[in-house]
Image: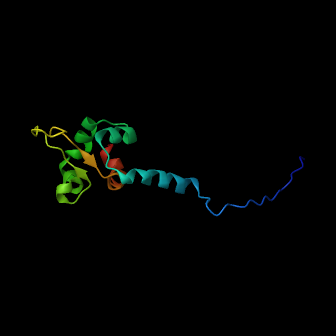
Amino acid sequence: MPQTITATVVMEVPDDKVIITKAEYSEYQALKDDDTWWTPADLKEHYHHDLAWFKDKVLYVQKYKKELSTEYGGCVHYSTNEPIKDQKYNGRYWSFEPGRFRKFMKEHFTEINS
């Protein structure tokens, strides 16, 4: 039978540091995105789908649009398709509030992906 040794290690955590779980760390990492609005490029980075997929599966699905659109208090600014003279984004600018959009995607994951 192999011998085993049980050791107790005492480490002092400096006052300016904390120890957190991996789950808490992941949650904090997700929250760091909440300081800026997402663009379609951010959606692709986080969800690995382009804007066309989101339009088809989420953004233009009537039952989701009222929940998502900033027009109704939601977390997505829907872009217009008409060019706007002298505007930087030429009428095609989308923006997404990260925290609320992430929550929406989690709540509707099964339905969206079926």
Q: Where is residue 33? Give x, y as percent.
A: 40, 50
Q: Where is residue 97? Give x, y as percent.
A: 31, 52
Judged from this view, the residue extending furthest toward the front is 86
Q: Is residue 9 above or below residue 112?
A: below
Q: Residue drawn 15% across and 40% down?
A: 87
Q: Is residue 6 left or right of residue 99?
A: right
- In the rendered view of the protein, which quadrant contains the C terminus? top left
Q: Is residue 62 above or below residue 14?
A: above
Q: Residue drawn 18% across and 59% down?
A: 72
User: Front-most of 21 and 12?
Assistant: 12
Q: Quadrant of residue 49?
A: top left
Q: Quadrant of residue 70?
A: bottom left
Q: Where is residue 63? Give x, y as percent.
A: 20, 52
Q: Where is residue 7? Give x, y as percent.
A: 83, 56
Q: How is the image coloured?
A: rainbow
Q: Is residue 34 above or below residue 80?
A: below
Q: Is residue 90 left or right of residue 43?
A: left
Total labels: the figure holds 0
Q: Residue drawn 18% across and 44% down?
A: 79
Q: Residue drawn 38% across and 53% down?
A: 34
Judged from this view, the residue extending furthest toward the bottom is 15
Q: Is residue 56 left or right of residue 14?
A: left
User: Front-most of 108 and 97?
Assistant: 97
